[in-house]
Image: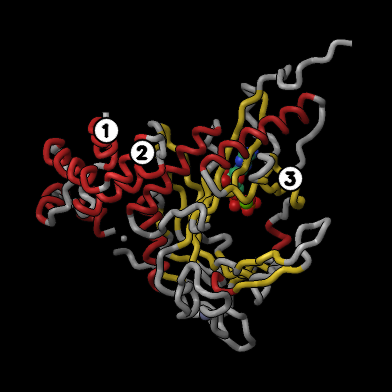
């Protein structure tokens, strides 16, 4: 019997990807209490009765979170809801002692936007606000499972998050990475999130499905969690493509489930069968009043419809982008001269430091340089 090589599939499949990105907001305090947010603080030092879910406490919404959500929504071409509310999402959360998460279910603050990646519009389904859970630290050592017991650090509990959900518009691992990178740049640029994947301030859940090329309906998706670098994002999509291709080729069915990306093996592992929305028993959060957003984040719209030239306002306020490459080149050269160590690293192929250098130029120009031109100038000056 002749064995077919495993990687050659009989049917050609198209991959369909949608990303759910959790972005931790750069507020000074938590979303429903005044505890400080401070990465790396001693465990359980930034906590209070509210974020510890003690009986009788009441949440108070942090205004800055709403402002950041609106800013993000506008940057991603979303509509901003005039009216929205918070909901309780019930679950067994060992790191969220209330055992429900305050989130937004059917009335998110922002809806229907898009982000352009390589001249292609990737739809943004919705953006909602929610609180983060704490951190479980798996400790001790167990021969079979790796740890005997877990410790909980509630410092992160109640940290404000935006969940930014894309439409299933992405068609390759690279496209998904480019979308995530573009999203990260925007969040950093508008200064609402530091976008640090390693520290978990930007987290990606990747939904992947396959369908026969030409098919109009989507296949069953799997959601991969624990993707904490752009490299892992690519590898997670690639492994899912291989895994699902094998299942479909052998006549099997992909089961909708949540899988975990394992950094060391590069494989995805089944974590749990997928919950459905009704499993969470969502209901409106009775301790918070619904939000009414006044029609100001519309003055801009009015300005435009009344025919005032926006360029005039931009010039008046000195908000114009610097596009004079001569002027920019001087600044970029200055930054490169002052950061020889980073320049050396970049030349050695450490692409990460490029972001740092671009950031320095943005800082120097108060954000008025075009990041694209700055990038080109860095490449030009290094060669
Ligand atoms: P859930 O909470 O059940 O994961 P969400 O609406 O938060 O649901 O997220 C669903 C994500 O899955 C979105 O990013 C969406 O684009 C994506 N998605 C939906 N259907 C598919 C599919 N068939 N293939 C790949 N991704 C999908
Ligand atoms: Mg999901
Ligand atoms: Zn607190």
- Cβ–Cβ below 8 Å for labels 1 and 2? yes
Left or right position of 191 against 233: left
Mark 1 CB near ligand 1 (8 Å cut): no
Left or right position of 28 against 147: left
User: For the view shown, which residue lies furthest in the bottom direction?
Assistant: 56
Select label 3 or label 1 by which is in front: 1
Q: Quadrant of residue 382?
A: top left
Is disc 3 surrounded by few (<14), some (14 to 19) or many (20+) residues within 10 Å?
A: few
- Front residue (pair 124, 2): 2
Is disc 2 surrounded by few (<14), some (14 to 19) or many (20+) residues within 10 Å?
A: some
Mark 2 CB near ligand 1 (8 Å cut): no
User: For the view shown, which residue lies furthest in the right direction?
Assistant: 1
Residue pictured at 48% horizontal, 72% vertical: 31
Question: Which residue is label 3 attached to?
Answer: 269
Question: Which residue is label 1 attached to?
Answer: 382
Question: Which residue is label 2 attached to?
Answer: 346
Helix, strand or loop at disc 2? Answer: helix
- Front residue (pair 81, 327): 327
Say whether disc 1 or disc 2 marks the residue closer to the N-terminus. 2
Q: Quadrant of residue 302?
A: bottom left
- Front residue (pair 168, 304): 168
Tell me where residue 66 appears, x and y as whole percent: 41, 67
Structural distance between the alpha carbons of marks 1 and 2: 9 Å
Structural distance between the alpha carbons of marks 3 and 2: 35 Å
- Front residue (pair 305, 212): 212
Q: Quadrant of residue 14?
A: top right
């Amino acid at each position: 019997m002749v064995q077919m090589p495993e990687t050659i599939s009989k049917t050609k499949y198209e991959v369909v990807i949608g990303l759910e990105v959790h972005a931790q907001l750069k507020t000074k305090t938590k979303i429903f209490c005044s505890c400080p947010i401070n990465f790396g603080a001693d465990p359980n030092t930034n906590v209070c009765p509210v974020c510890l879910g003690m009986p009788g406490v009441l949440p108070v919404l942090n205004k800055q979170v709403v402002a950041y959500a609106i800013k993000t929504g506008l940057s991603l071409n979303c509509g901003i809801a005039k009216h929205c509310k918070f909901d309780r999402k019930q679950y067994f959360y060992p790191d969220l002692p209330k055992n429900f998460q305050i989130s937004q279910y059917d009335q998110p603050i922002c809806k229907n936007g898009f982000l352009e990646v390589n001249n292609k519009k990737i739809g943004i389904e919705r953006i909602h606000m929610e609180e983060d859970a704490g951190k479980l630290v798996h400790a001790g050592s167990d021969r079979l499972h790796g740890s005997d017991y877990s410790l909980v650090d509630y410092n992160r509990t109640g940290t404000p998050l935006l969940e930014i959900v894309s439409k299933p518009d992405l068609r390759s691992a690279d496209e998904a990475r480019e979308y995530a990178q573009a999203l990260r740049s925007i969040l950093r640029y508008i200064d609402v999130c530091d976008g640090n994947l390693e520290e978990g301030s930007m987290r990606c859940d990747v939904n992947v499905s396959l369908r026969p090329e030409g098919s109009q309906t989507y296949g069953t998706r799997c959601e991969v969690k624990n993707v904490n670098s752009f490299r892992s994002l690519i590898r997670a999509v690639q492994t899912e493509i291989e895994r699902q291709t094998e299942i479909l080729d052998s006549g099997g069915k992909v089961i909708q489930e949540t899988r975990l990306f394992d950094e060391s093996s590069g494989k995805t592992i089944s974590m749990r069968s997928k919950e459905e929305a009704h499993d969470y028993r969502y209901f409106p959060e009775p301790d918070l009043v619904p939000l009414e957003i006044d029609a100001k984040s519309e003055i801009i719209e009015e300005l435009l419809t009344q025919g005032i030239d926006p360029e005039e306002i931009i010039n008046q306020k000195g908000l114009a982008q610097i596009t004079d490459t001569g002027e920019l080149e001087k600044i970029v050269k200055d930054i490169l001269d002052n950061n020889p160590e980073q320049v050396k690293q970049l030349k050695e192929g450490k692409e990460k430091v490029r972001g740092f250098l671009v950031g320095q130029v943005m800082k120097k120009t108060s954000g008025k340089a075009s990041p694209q031109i700055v990038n080109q100038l860095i490449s030009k000056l290094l060669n």
